[in-house]
Amino acid sequence: MDLTSLQESYRLDEIEWAMLPGERPREAGCNARLAAHGKNPVARIAKIRVGDTTGFGISRISKEQAQKLAGTPVQEMFYENGAVKESFRVLEFPLLDWLGKFTGRSVHDLFYQPGVPPIKRKRIVPCYDTTLYFDELHLTDDLAAVEWMKREAQEGRDRGHRNFKIKVGRGARWMETRKGLQRDIDVIRAVREVAGPEGKIMIDANNGYTLNMTKELLMETKDSSLYWIEEAFHEDRVLYEDLKEWMTKHRITVKIADGEGQADPRLMEWAKDKIIDVVQYDIINPGFSEWLTLGSMLDAWGAGSAPHSYGNIIGNYVNGHLAAAVKGFEFVEWDHADVNGLDGSAYRIEDGFVTIPDSPGFGLQLDDEAFGLVRRESGWVVKRAD
């Protein structure tokens, strides 16, 4: 990538920060570990200005950090390939958005690598509905509970989804172990009916299973053709090797995915050794630039990349741009939520795919008036000292 146009005179002139409240279509319930996730995630947004060009994106930068960065030449912030240097990744997404707008290119196009599957080159990326939490725990009638979850899956299908990730592990905390496992199984079968034979179904136990529970569920749902099982139990090479051997013996081809929770660095080694199949470190932390390196390594090993992006709203949109650089990119994790002042309507979900806009940067629009109002009430602004 040619960054010679980033002259010394281009400096970080201004940084604004505010938290924009969001709203999901419905409240997200429990998972195997945690209580209800709620209906109102927030988008922590930093907006930067360099000359006449602005960029914005998710950021947890503090005002003190911003004061130290204001005035820094932007050419010092990027590597030659456009990735953001480690010291500046607290502003990674605003910087990438700015770079795209400055160069007139989408982030997707900035990082495109030859050899990426043609459909992803066309900015059409597989996605899945990640909203199927334990929303039916108030129901003791198992049939009614399964119907409840089936209706929620249908809501996702009506929004254009064909692929679904289901939270499982009800018996780890919220239900009696056997009853919880059976309800997990019944919900999986019900969601398969909604997804149809072509839809992909993933399950996420949030470390709520034992090895033997995992085996029992995989055997009982063999006819449901699960695509992957995520965080079945805490990261353990011995247990994963046992599970792989057992799956091979029983001709179960479900992929093993991990990396959201503890982001255990050993998972990369295990992916290289074919012990797990998909790595899921978060798209925000370690971030997009780090994922360029991780994805390249996983591609070389024949493993999948599926960055976690739940709960921050912006992750829905930025995740798919990585697909242009990573051949083994699996899915965008989609946690639908609306934010006053943030327009993501250029992203369209149809038949299980999200179309990534080709407009400069990440293709998101920020209402400056709405953002400014929240910033003045509860955020801050830092300007470069002349």
Image (cartoon, helix red, strand yellow):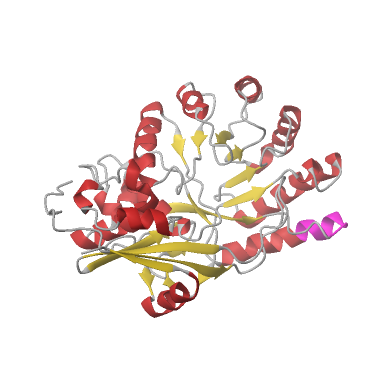
Q: Give the left or right position of residue 16, taking residue 331 as reference.
A: left
Magenta stretch containing residue 143, yes or no?
Answer: yes
Query: What residue do we see at 84% from left, 60% from top?
Result: 139
Residue 223: give x, y in percent of width and height: 68, 40
Q: Position of residue 28 (x, y in %)?
A: 66, 60
246 or 93, which lies in front?
A: 93
The location of residue 161, given as percent across then percent down, is: 53, 59
Viewed as shown, does residue 320 lie left or right of 277? left
Magenta part, dominant SS: helix
Is any atom of residue 122 visible in this view? no
* Position of 364 relative to 237 (above/below): below
Viewed as shown, does residue 187 lie left or right of 374?
Answer: right
Q: Residue at x 39, y 41 (%)?
A: 291
* Residue range highlighted in magenta: 139-147
386 on left or right of 239? left
Does any portion of residue 292 appear in the rendered image? yes
Residue 107 position (above or below residue 39):
above
Image quarter where the C terminus lies is bottom left
Residue shown at 20%/61% (left/top)?
102
